[in-house]
Image: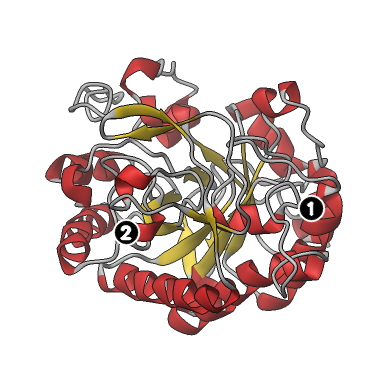
Amino acid sequence: MNLDSKIPSTPTLLSPINIGPYHLSNRLVMAPLTRMRAPDSCPTDLMTTYYAQRASAGLIISEATPISTQGVGYPATPGIYNESQVKSWKKITEAVHAKKGHIFMQLWHVGRISHPDFHGGQLPVAPSAIAPKGNAITPSGMQAFVTPRALETNEISGIIDDYKRAAQNALDAGFDGIEIHSANGYLLDEFLRDGTNKRTDIYGGSVANRARFLLEVTDALMGVCGADRVGIRLSPSGTFNDMSDSNPESIFVYLLKQLNLLELAYVHVVDALEGDIRHGANVIKLETLRAAYNGTLIVCGGYDQTRADETLAKGLADAVAFGQLYIANPDLAERFKLKAPLNIPDASSFYGGTEKGYTDYPSLTE
């Protein structure tokens, strides 16, 4: 007997993988990327071209997509809360599927990272009335963040209903699944962290209480989509949007152990970035997160091909998401396969604008 034949091959970015009910051709994930190119909050034909260009990723995660008007905090971001949006997104999912790609929608509520200009003069909402440092990007330019309104306990169920409607809309638009955005200082992340959550009701205080809202949203969306078509994005070491926690390891290890019980499609973890460390992040090692979660784990955060393959080979993750590299390289999987040179992303065109810096990056065949 050839014993070597029983030893599984070491996975690389180009190895296939099963995520949820789907067989993916590789382990490259296109990270969710806010691009602010959807006037009137409705997806455009230009967006259809953009996503279709990147369909060779094993999985595309859409740009963060507000679940309601209350969840909006940036201009020209596409929503998923009305019929026109659903019809426009359907063009995108059909274009991705025509190229044999897979695409999940990231569902978003920005929480306090908003401004009254988006809400008819009403305050943004948050777990507690604590203003973030910095400025909101509004249709009229940069404006200082305001102190948000703390949500009443009886309002939480209404937001969960908004998530459910948005998830059903995403399925109606042809998405293969959804990703719950619970990272980067937006509403669900704000409930997790004790720097932003000072509540004294059942959604504040203990780690179990602070995790309650996200777990309730997750349970509700499992009922809409099925557990194997639900992913969650977390940023355990993140400081973006003025986030902090006195003991992040306690809340995130607890949360991941709870998520272990649910058999989700995946958990998507944002590694500590240089900016997080510079802003005093309490960094949780990837090894700690991997030990706490035994389901499919996607990681992201400034990876290149070499670091990604090393991480997969060590078993610290099952797939790797790329952001800026996918902005500039629509055929990133093919470039990695051929060890071809990569296009350099143009940061000046990341947000807003036209096809420049959006759909005009060349592929290898152009």
Is residue 294 among the parts visible in the rendering?
no
Q: In the picture, residue 235 is in which quadrant?
A: top right
Q: Name the residue under label 2.
A: 69
Asked whether, in this view, residue 42 is left or right of residue 334, the answer is left
Residue 325 picture location, percent across and down = 46, 27
Tell me the crowding category of disc 2: few under 14, some 14 to 19, or many 20 or more residues within 10 angstroms, Cα based: some
Secondary structure type for disc 2: helix
Estimate the x, y position of residue 21 in percent, counting from the top left: 49, 72
Q: Residue at x 25, y 41 (%)?
A: 76
Would you say the residues marked 2 and 1 are in contact, meaning their CB atoms lie under 8 Å apart?
no
> What residue is pinned by disc 1?
290
The amino acid type of the residue labelled 1 equals Arg
Task: Specify the quadrant that holds the N terminus.
Answer: bottom right
Q: Which amino acid type is shown beneath numbered disc 2?
A: Thr
Distance CA(mark 2)–CA(mark 1): 35 Å
Front-most of residues 214 and 22: 214
- Label 1 neighbour load within 10 Å: few <14, some 14-19, many 20+: some
